[in-house]
Amino acid sequence: LKQMGDEMSADLADDTKQENDAIKNYEELTAAKEKEVETLQAQIEDKSTRLGNIGVEVTEKINDIEDTKEALEADKKFVKELDEGCATKEQEWEVVKKTRAEELLALAETIKVLNDDDALDLFKKTLPGASSSFLQLKVTASAQKSAALQIIRRAAHRRRSPALDLIALALQGKTAGFEKVL
């Protein structure tokens, strides 16, 4: 019985030691797993933050793409309008060039006719004498003043303008010169 008691005590001691070792291993394993869970939880939070940031970037890029598409459509519309405007301007320029070429041709023909000896004879026959000329030889300041006064009086009479009457009165008087009216 004593031997049985000693064996049971020895078995109990072995089992207790094994149980204590198992508890110690369990506590160490639990601590390691808790540390691993904390590490993995931190990685999950980090990846969730990165995923959120990437989602925001994707949304911004999508908005940028939409804005770029709208800008592209507006640019295409502008280019189309510009092409149409350029085509119109090219047509107008062609008309201007054609008209100018016709005018230059007409001027060349006119100069040719005027340089012809027959034209010189015709001019000599048309003018009564050497003293006749197309040039105005002399214009006085008083003649210019009276011509301007007549134009202003006619305009003032037609429009019934007190301001023009005042200018005409200033020109007619001797105190204000034409340079003061201007």
Image: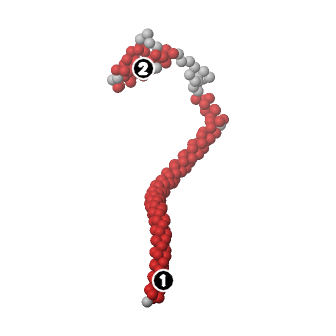
Q: Camera-side residue: 83 or 18?
A: 18
Q: Is residue 178 above or below residue 92?
A: above
Which mark, residue 10? 1
Residue 47 in view (yes/no):
no
Q: Which of labels 1 and 2 is toward the front?
A: 1
Q: Is residue 165 above or below residue 80?
A: above
Which mark, residue 75? none
Which residue is depicted at the point 49% across and 74% down? 25
How far apart are the two marked residues, 1 and 2, measured between alpha carbons?
A: 148 Å
Horizontal side of 127 relative to 79 (left or right) equals right
Q: Residues within 10 Å of mark 1 (few under 14, many from 20)?
A: few
Horizontal side of 139 relative to 48 (left or right) equals right
Residue furthest out toward the right: 117
Give the quadrant of the N terminus: bottom left
Element marked by disc 1: helix
Which residue is depicted at the point 47% across and 86% down? 7
- The percent coordinates of residue 4 (x first, y second) are 45, 88
Element marked by disc 2: helix
- The percent coordinates of residue 124 (x first, y second) are 62, 29
- How many numbered marks appear? 2
**Identity, as a three-letter code, of the amino acid under mark 1:** Ala
**Identity, as a three-letter code, of the amino acid under mark 2:** Gln
Q: Camera-side residue: 9 or 132?
A: 9
Q: Circle 2 is placed at which residue position?
A: 150
User: Disc 1 or 2, which lies upstream in sequence?
Assistant: 1
Which residue is depicted at the point 48% across and 83% down? 10
Which residue is depicted at the point 51% across and 15% down? 141
